[in-house]
Amino acid sequence: MSKPIVAVVGRPNVGKSTLFNDLAGQQISIVKDTPGVTRDRIYADVTWLDRSFTLIDTGGIEPETNDIILSQMREQAEIAIETADVIIFLTDVRQGLVDSDAKVADMLRRSHKPVILVVNKVDNFDKFMPDVYEFYNLGIGDPIPVSAVSKLGIGDMLDEVIKHFPEDSDGDEEDDRPKIAIVGKPNVGKSSIVNKLVGKNRVIVSDIAGTTRDAIDTTIKYNNKEYVFIDTAGLRRKNKIKEEIERYSIIRTVAAVERADIVIIVIDAIEGVTEQDAKIAGIAHERGKGIIVAVNKWDAIEKNDKTIYEYTNKIKDTLSFMPYAEILFISALTGQRLNKIYELIDEIIDSQNMRVPTGVLNEILTEAVAMQQPPSDKGKRLRIYYITQVSVKPPTFVMFVNDKQLTHFSYTRYIENKIREAFGFRGTSIRFINRERK
Ligand code: GDP
Ligand code: GDP
């Protein structure tokens, strides 16, 4: 269920954004309203052949001087090594091979991550190929020539990228331990929560498991069951430059969420829920993960018998796109209700894996349609013939309809609510696909 992550690293002006736009097409996720990364494209979902992956553009701000370029490239390379399954190292045939390329190539080589060396701006293969060979000197394999502007060589590059993906994770290497990502703004208490949960319950994982990522995950045993908290080392790292903090924390969030079954979105009770929290929550929602909203620092606010109610309403309002989220009020400081997290995780995993028999689903559909007519347009009414659940994690339903044009978001939401009334599916998003039956 977790998709591979591909990161693009390279000096300014080699064509990272151009390549990113080629690959991302229409599916770009634009992170709106985040100061510093406004209208900037950070990640996108890409499908090539039958493989999907999340593409990350590590490049951000434009540095002015050469030594800043190098230090920023190092940071880009670091975050790529930390988060990506495959790294595209983009260079520029017209600028040729430069010193900072060699230094970054060294870093990437030492990481033992799969690195695809791509030489951009090869707009004319006959003319520029001799210059491409120079890039063999980097010692990170065969350079692949592309032209991001003319869209040349992109397919060959993608073929090479997907070769390095971990085997199709359908069987999911028998690891059925819940994987949990704890995300949220800086200082809301993410590290404190993990530290408190760990207490004496940390499981020392032998490094047979292999990858560097597994090594920085924290495994905790509770009630004889193991839970894996993802990427907690990344939680403690602090960057220097403000724009980078934002860009890199989004990249880390995307990467952690991608690997997780369940995402705990931590909100600071003192501050209350904010638009930035909503943006972070959106990343988890888009990816169909299980969601717990944890309102932390509950010890630090004045409360009366209405406080929980007021907080809940405010959260439901700000995070209105995820009404299914579980909400929990905790304190990492005192440990209040912290163990409830495990209970919720177990419940949500059950929801994510629940399968509803087709017969029962269609009874609910028939009843729902009888109670409220489907929408119509220009005299033609939507008909839903049949509904069936096609997959889990997240639970996904296909509805066979007479005409997809007639389907309407609000009616699908109505059907969703009916299904939730009957079966719960607490803590997980559920998806609907409309298919026309001719
Ligand atoms: P970034 O800073 O790495 O994101 O680079 P950009 O994508 O902004 O590209 C920098 C410049 O290189 C822009 O003027 C692009 O139009 C140009 N560029 C990108 N790809 C190609 C290419 O394949 N061929 C040529 N000739 N120019 C390109
Ligand atoms: P992170 O940046 O999200 O990992 O946040 P930290 O775990 O570093 O916590 C940020 C600050 O909030 C620290 O000063 C913590 O001591 C404080 N903090 C964390 N959890 C709680 C809590 O439950 N109650 C109170 N009062 N303070 C907390």
Image: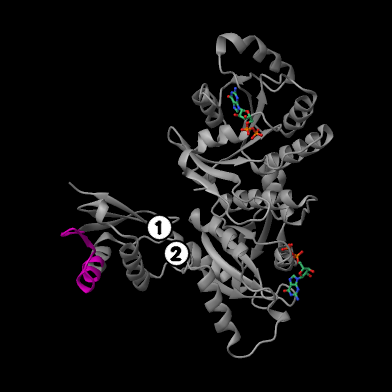
What residue lies at 69% left-to-right and 43% top-to-bottom?
82
* Residue annotated with mark 2: 351
- Name the spot of residue 281 as percent of width and height, x first: 56, 61
- Above-or-below relation of 97 to 299: above
- Name the spot of residue 133 as percent of width and height, x first: 67, 13
- Quick one: 159 or 42, which is closer to the camera? 42
Does the segment drawn in magenta span residue 375? yes
Label 2, label 1: how far apart the Cα atoms are: 8 Å
Query: Is residue 261 among the parts visible in the rendering?
Result: no
What residue lies at 61% left-to-right and 46% top-to-bottom?
40
Query: What secondary structure is found at the residue carrying circle 1?
Result: loop
Does the segment drawn in magenta span residue 86? no
- Quick one: 437 or 421, which is closer to the camera? 437
What amino acid is labelled 1 in the image?
A: Pro
Question: Which of the four quarters of the rendered structure image does ligand 1 lie in?
Answer: top right
Earlier residue among tags 2 and 1: 2
In the displayed orientation, state which residue is furthest to the bottom: 305
The magenta segment is: 365-383
* Crowding at mark 2 (Cα within 10 Å: few <14, some 14-19, many 20+): many
Examine the image and state in which quarter residue 334 appears. bottom right
State yes or no: discs 2 and 1 in contact (Cβ < 8 Å).
yes
What amino acid is labelled 2 in the image?
A: Ser
